[in-house]
Amino acid sequence: MYLIKKICCIGAGYVGGPTMAVFAKNCPDIEIEVVDINQIRINAWNSDDLTKLPVFEPGLPQIIKKVRGRNLNFSTNVSNSIREADMVFISVNTPIKEKGVGAGETSDLRWVESCARQISEIAEGHTIVVEKSTLPVKTAQTIKDILFSSNYQTSEKSFSVLSNPEFLSEGTAIRDLEEPDRVLIGGDDDEAIKALNDIYLNWIPQEKLIFTNLWSSELSKLTANAFLAQRISSINSISAICEVTGADIKDVSFAIGKDNRIGSKFLKSGPGFGGSCFKKDILNLVYLAKFYGLNEVAGYWRKVIEINSWQQKRIYEIVVEKLFGNLVDKKIAILGFSFKENTNDTRESPAISICRNLINEGAFLSINDEKVTEEDIEKSLKKDNFVYGFNKNEPCWEFQSNLYSAFENAHAVIILTSWDKYKAIDWERVSLSVKSPFWVFDTRSILDIKNIQDLGFNFWQLGFGNNN
Ligand code: NAD
Ligand code: UGA
């Protein structure tokens, strides 16, 4: 029987930080250390000012306040933490490869491999290595090969490898971790499985724990994300049909969601799915299918991504068309830059491609977001890169922390993220400072159409068949 007294989690990102905070809260007898090579990130996790944590997640600061310094610590001393740990979670980034074999299609595993090598070298006694990162199927074999074949093997050193994919969503991570629909553990070592199972039993009922072999566990994670993304592409494809036929996507979603077999969740049409994982995980599935010669399967899943890109492109094209085919010398307020509400994450945010295209047409953007910083927007919309912008010597966008200032002298507004604040905009106040005619583009279906139209604004809502 393995007794787990110390846990090391490698990777202090959107998964490692919140996940280990919830572990620490529910397992006061286990000492947990989250380690990262990024000193700035670790400093932010250790910040006295809890509004400066690197991840914005509702409920997270309260937990950090309770457990940090008690049984949760953040550090850059990766080696030391691995040496002392009985269980090591690998929770590092696994983005799509940019160069070489499989570029643009499969995950770059350099960070996972480097963790495996470091664990192999440094770990002492028996160490249970847990894949928390989302990984291509069969990565556990790579990890095992590295762990077991190292030059550093001694008779006192041994390893078990488990897969324990994470299903949390950003913005609701704490709730998802506290009350998950299920926890999946894949592996072939019963004692190691029991050790991880017992940790979860501190707050999760046994019936929610599911056990499979390693490959089913790895594949289930990719498949879950692919199915979720597929629902979004499906409803987004129908949103376009609504617009041309006079139907309303909100009614259609509601009507089909009432069927228990379909269910009501993940049926909100919008500017396409963003986030660091959906596209990456589907691309991994496509790569896997192609690798095994399953070309029809690969083509099927690739379409989910194509519809997603098309949705973003068609929204931008509609904006151009409604604004008389010309955006030069026009100011557009952009409300929301994060890929969804309640997160500061901008990875793969639909706002990025839509804003780039608008700037390319010559528009000036005034961008507001509740949690994304100007520096983060700059990383995605580097002002220097806009050589194709029309007004080459003028800035092509500004960050506007004051929501109402973003509207001043604007020709249009586009709502891209459904932050609560945008649902309660004082449109009368807005009407005093904008140009006329003024267009409101609501890509998240959060506004009351009548309210807007009564003020004389032009209004376009995604998937609404009676747009003017
Ligand atoms: P992230 O980029 O926010 O964090 C990863 C961290 O790992 C970074 O801070 C990086 O510096 C660190 N790191 C990389 N190599 C390291 C090494 N060798 N030693 C120490 N630290 C190292 O990524 P994330 O969003 O937390 O995602 C992590 C994994 O979890 C990915 O595989 C992702 O697909 C998966 N996942 C993410 C989410 C999500 O909502 N973001 C949800 C479920 C699963
Ligand atoms: C998603 C999954 O929901 C998690 O289960 C998974 O663990 C995670 O990916 C991951 O592996 O990274 P996340 O990307 O954080 O979580 O957020 P979601 O709520 O899934 O939203 C993803 C995107 O889809 C967002 O851009 C969101 O606006 C969009 N979306 C979501 C819609 O357009 N419509 C919907 O009905 C739901």
Image (cartoon, rainbow, N blue to C red):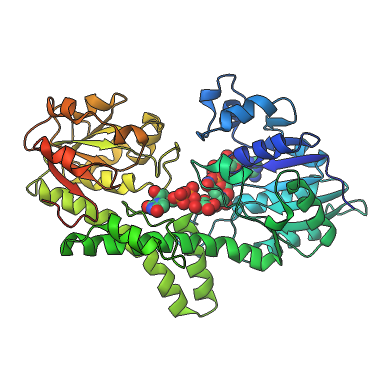
Compared to 403, does 27 lie above or below?
Answer: below
Choose between 148 and 188: the one closer to the eye: 188
Q: Position of residue 73 (x, y in %)?
A: 70, 30
Compared to 147, does 36 lie above or below?
Answer: above
Can residue 93 be seen here?
no
Residue 229 lies in quadrant: bottom left
Choose between 67 and 76: the one closer to the eye: 67
Q: Position of residue 76 (x, y in %)?
A: 67, 32
Q: Position of residue 347 (x, y in %)?
A: 43, 45
Question: Is 78 left, or right, of 107 in this rendering?
Answer: right
The residue at the far right in this view is 155
Q: Which residue is drawn at 27% across and 48% down?
A: 443
Choose between 3 and 425: the one closer to the eye: 425
Can residue 296 be seen here?
yes
- Marks counted in the figure total 0
Q: Residue at x 55, y 42 (%)?
A: 173
Choose between 7 and 203: the one closer to the eye: 203
Compared to 240, does 321 lie above or below?
Answer: above
Question: Is 210 left, or right, of 258 in this rendering?
Answer: right
The residue at the far top in this view is 48
Residue 230 lies in quadrant: bottom left
Q: Which residue is drawn at 32% across and 55% down?
A: 269
Q: Position of residue 281 (x, y in %)?
A: 50, 60
